[in-house]
Amino acid sequence: MAEASINPPEAQQAGKKSFWFVVLGVIVLAAGLIAAANLFLATVISVLFVGAMMFAGGILEIVHSFGVKSWGRFILWFLTGVLYAIAGLLTFYNPLLASAILTLLIAASLVAAGVVRIFAGFTQRQSSGWGWMVAAGILTLIVGVVIFLRWPVNSLWILGIFLAVDLMFQGLSYITYGLGLRGRTI
């Protein structure tokens, strides 16, 4: 069996890429740890980011509405954009209320996803591994119910913990990917 030969310029390029993936991973992991250290601040930052994206999306819909040919469609796009932009501004006006609403939506989504996964798992009983699908659904359902039971108090930190955990896992994945590139033969 022939082994892949290492072309020196390609190996050097992979080495540079691996370094930058590790650097990016360390930065993202550090951001996750900082977010985990202050979950309330991470929640507020998450809400403000969502609000900014809603506002920007609303403005883009308003601009887009002027390119629509018919009057009825113009009004529909324009009003949708206005409502979206207002919702974005309201998150800046009252980030705690927005946090509570987003947390409630996350809880409802987790409960719904859990029920669907459990149902899907049971419909696949003839396949191997169906129990894992049911187990994942039960875990998702439990997380959603726990969030519901502690709402609205937990809305001060739920979004922050989701952000912190996501950043930490993403940072670790960049680090391991970069270290894996270092040992890769081209």
Image: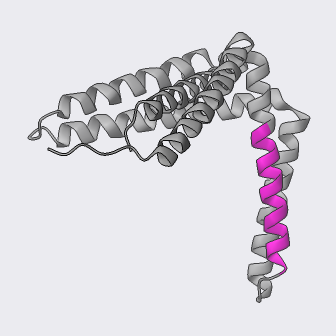
* Quadrant of the snapshot with the C terminus: top left
Q: Which residues are magenta?
A: 49-66
Farthest residue, direction left: 126
Q: Position of residue 129 (x, y in %)?
A: 17, 33
Q: Is residue 46 left or right of residue 109?
A: right
Given residues 23 and 61, the one toward you in this image is 23
Which residue is at a point 18% across and 34% down the rendered structure image?
Answer: 130
* Quadrant of the snapshot with the N terminus: top left
Farthest residue, direction bottom: 69
The reply to whether the magenta stretch includes residue 25 is no
Given residues 30 and 70, the one toward you in this image is 30
Which residue is at a point 83% across and 38% down the rendered structure image?
Answer: 91
Residue 157 sits above or below residue 6 on the image: above
Residue 154 sits above or below residue 15 on the image: above
Which residue is at a point 84% across and 68% down the rendered structure image?
Answer: 62
Q: Is residue 181 left or right of residue 122?
A: right
Q: Position of residue 101 (x, y in %)?
A: 70, 33
Q: Position of residue 170 (x, y in %)?
A: 56, 30
The quarter holding residue 99 reads top right
Which residue is at a point 54% across and 31% down the rendered structure image?
Answer: 174
Farthest residue, direction right: 93
Q: Is residue 171 left or right of residue 176?
A: right
What secondary structure do most residues of the magenta stretch adopt?
helix
Q: Is residue 126 left or right of residue 43?
A: left
The reply to whether the magenta stretch includes residue 63 is yes
The quarter holding residue 116 reads top left
Q: Position of residue 79 (x, y in %)?
A: 81, 66
